[in-house]
Amino acid sequence: MSALFSQYQPAGFFDEVFHAPGDARPHYDGILESIGSLSPSEYGHRQRAVDTAFLRQGVTFTVYGDDQGTERIFPFDLMPRVIPHAEWERIESGLIQRITALNLFLNDVYHGQQIITDGVVPEELVKSASHYRPELRGIQVPHGIYIHVCGTDLVRDADGEYYVLEDNSRCPSGASYMLENRNAMKRAFPGLLQSLPVRPVDAYGSMLRETLAHLAPREVIDPVIVVLTPGVFNSAYFEHCYLARQMGVPIVEGRDLIVRNSRIFMRTTDGLRQVHVIYRRIDDDFLDPHVFRKDSLLGVPGIVDAYRKGNVALANSIGTGVADDKAVYACVPKMIKYYLDQEPILKNVPTYLGVDPKECEYILATLENLVVKAVNESGGYGMLMGPTSTKQERADFAERIKANPRNYIAQPVLALSRHPVFVDDHFEGRHVDLRPYVLYGDRVRVVPGGLTRVALRKGSLVVNSSQGGGSKDTWVLWDDQSSC
Amino acid sequence: MLSRVADSIYWMARYVERAENLSRLLLSTQDLLLDAGAEAADESQFWGPILLTTGDEEAYADLYPEITGESVVEFLTVREDNPNSIINCISSARENARTVRDQISNEMWECLNGLRLFVESADGREMCRAQSAVFHERVLRGSYEFQGIADCTTPRGEVWHFLRMGTCLERADKTSRLLDTCSALSREMPPHPAARPLRWSALLRSCSAWHAFQAHASRPDPVKIIEYLLLDETFPRSVACCIAEVHAALLVLCGSGALNDMPAPLRHAGRLRADLAYTTVSEVLGTGLHEVIDQLQARLNQIGETIFQTFVLYPDAQPESGATRLPEASVQRGAFHTWNQDDIMAQQQQQQQQQQ
Amino acid sequence: MRLRVFHRTRYTYRAPVRENHNEVRLRPATADKARLEFFLLKVNPPARLRHFRDPWLNYVHYFDIVEPHSELVIEAQSTLRTTTPYADGTPDGTTFTALATSAPDDMLRPFLASSRYVEITPEAWRLALDIRDGREDVFDTAQAIMRHINREWTYAPNTTNASTHMREVMETKCGVCQDFAHVMLGLCRALGIPARYVSGYLYNSAGDHLRGAQASHAWCEVFLPGRGWFGLDPTNDTLADDRHIKIATGRDYHDAAPVSGDFQGPVGATGALSVELEIERLDR
């Protein structure tokens, strides 16, 4: 065993690489052989080369806090996470099932509401979700699909079982890092990638484009597609640009678009040009000052009207956030049963709802063993990690829960799986999750790969970039015969 | 192409060119000082005109009590409160590039991003303090690299034409301002070949025209120099050559050069080009170099303004409510700065992107 | 073979309809050699989906769409492995004598009698005897029947419809896979060979030009005592092997129809039907 791994302890957690100290899972054999042949300083050298390249290319996100937003690279750990073929097939099936059910749910919620009539999902739960948009009810969206791009967060528990943590059905980000991470790996370990049956992810751009083109009004042969960004100050601006480029479509800001006669046009050097499909990375709230927030400077006044008339398609649709509500999340297994007559392939994390008096009582009684989350927050904000919290923090949270029980849910603390991460001059275990990207155009398609996020702080369970997270490339194998 | 994108590309090119011209000007002035030797007793005589060239003498006077080489270099290179300092130009160019990253080649973006990382790094600042010449040479090289990459990676479409218009208008502006600093100098070569000719050759160096001019005319005759930098269509930094290129770009962008309904920028550029072509240097001297340049500056601004109005601000594409109007100053100061920043910045950051 | 199937059926109504009740048989049968790795059935507009097993053990999904709607889309997708029952050659050796002496149980009896679309007419019986031509081997005879139908009947889309009876097809001697299968059922049953109708899909590999691969396909299976059911595809004159994906079985089309239903709507609301079928081979 090389110096890099000699001290490595998988102890106590499900480790993605090692069954037991020094005993690797077969699909990591090739990688360990290749990486293990490097000395710690050689490995460190390659790691730094990648960091420098990211900085030079501006593969960054922006962190706010002080006056000036500072650009940082999203820390990247060179050792890839490998997912065997059979395991991936299961993830893929589970995601297809789940996204299909979520879309049927949204379609139902914004039309006949059968699932409410049949008493499977409580009406109150849907109508009190802060991202529910009654304005959208009755609007025919193209092909009845609401979520076109989804970035589901998966985690593994101590037994290695995959769980869905969040569905991210609004504006999931990070696909650009998935693509750039793979490029970095190609530069850092060209031979290794060539020798293993790793499924490529670089078709994501063209898949996304196809997905969006599918939404265009049927009579349009060559639809004009644009990416609508909040602007350069948004932390994900790099990604918006990157994806526009991958697709070969313009990136626009709200001020580049105007509405004439319920149609959307962009202002070009050659006059006005009609836009048919908008991949928007702006929140619902800011999309149209006529309908939602009046003070929005980012939106396009009249865009919702154009959408309602079917003159422009939006991806994702408006109001998909209702499926992201963490209390609605708890109902997803019931949706799968209801619409698809099946059991979920990917499990939900057991969830206690603050809105249910009995469960609320349980939450308050066992706060120190639970993770409490605000139902509408993402990115690791508005969260209480029970076991590591102080008494004061728990007391504060208890008050907040009592004041607004609908706004909170609680889940048991999962012992997230770990993966070796390079620290100084050796590898240590860090907790990881997995965000695969799902596209829904004519069919549901899952990109074979995804973003593996790493909680870089020792012992931390929070993988979000805004909270000290990093990422890894994710290698899905074509077959399991030739071990990796 | 999106109007906003055209605007940003145009300004990206202008800022790069501006940083390049400033660097070269500072370099040649330092050379001049070294060459002048004893005459350099009064530093301000050399550095003062530079501030006139950039048009920042007032801003400078607010910050510094007197004109010294060190403070002028600092003011024009690294001062963050001087919007036209090299560092700010590069970072504005880079911010403009960032908003149009999807339109320019990766290599262009990386080059500009790399240059900006350098000038803002601790190493860069230290180099600027200790060896400003090396720093300025690095900026010059960065600009050459950028323009070279742009030349061989940009398709000859709209992006290219806006890029060239930005570069050439900025260059014409700077060349004419440089000429203006010499307008007060005697056009007679002084009898004693001590210091005076140095000023004229410094001017040539500031336009990197020294070698080209040597090949063009054997003797550094001030009249010939004025003619060369103002009216010669073969030298790439001369005003005439820059305007010819702007005119050519506008011809392509406007689709035709038909006389009726000719778009304003094409009309202005065409007229200026013709004027420069049919003017002799003695006519210029007869009117007075300073006056000619004053007028030229106004016409350059007019071309810039009409380009903005024609390609960026479609009168019929204004928001129906008329609530948002571009502030006037934007015409002078480049696309990236044009909007009410604080509010929009706050909202842009606020978006609940489902983050990594 | 490892195959992925995507099957979308779209009904576009001329006027909004309501109370649309449907039963669909679209889940590949897993009873025998085909292993179903993944199956998903999606109905749009959304409705509660449920299922039961019918007397022939088919999976039947059903749903009601109460609210007015003018389009109904049913999508079935699956990933499965198929194998051929003929890996060791054809199941020869079962004689008509053996067939006659093995008393048919209740499960088999329906496959020997007439059914809604299949009738054992005297003409069918005479033709079957002619084709049998004194053969003693049951499977050999079934193959002869298949060959005969394939040779004598003309494959002609749009000459028949979903509810065309076998009697008519015996006269006109033309039709599509469903009709070919019905004729074969009639001829086999006339000779006392238990025979059932199979609906499913057909995978056309690059070199093949099999008929019926663009939409749902149909063929038949005959029963050999002690050995089980064996599929024969009269439309293509071929044994039903791992290219044939079995969905449902029954006495005839009526028992195995992929989609059947009714709705309330104005006269003439019945609209256009379009089918997309894509079968992709995953191994190799």
Image (spheres, coloured by chain):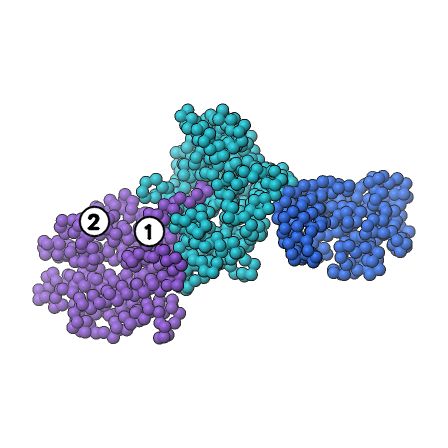
Image vertical order of residue B214 relative to residue B36, above or below? below
Nearer-the-camera pick, B111 or B281: B281
Please give the name of the residue rendered at 63% of the width and 44% of the height, measured from the top-left corner.
C47
Mark 2 or mark 1, earlier in chain = 2
Give the image location of residue A336, x and y in percent.
60, 40
> Residue B340: which numbered mark, if any?
1
The residue at 71%/42% (across/down) is: C59
- Residue shown at 65%/47% (left/top)? C65
Q: Which chain is cyan?
A: A
- The kind of residue on which mark 1 rests is Asn
Does A189 sit left or right of B10 as displayed?
A: right
Residue B74 in the image: state x and y as whole percent: 20, 49
Three-letter code, disc 2 = Glu
**In this rendering, is residue C68 above or below C159?**
above
Depth check, mark 2 against mark 1: the one in front is 1
Display colour for chain C: blue
Query: In the rendered structure, the residue with mark 1 lies on which chain?
Result: B
| Residue at numbered disc 2 | B74
Q: Callout 2 environment at 10 Å: few (<14), some (14 to 19), or many (20+)? A: some
Pick whichever, B156 or C45, lies toward us: C45
Q: Label 2 is found on which chain of the structure?
A: B
Q: Are marks 2 and 1 on the same chain?
A: yes
Colour applied to chain B: purple
Task: Return the residue found at the far front.
Answer: C266
User: Residues under labels 2 and 1: Cα distance?
Assistant: 29 Å
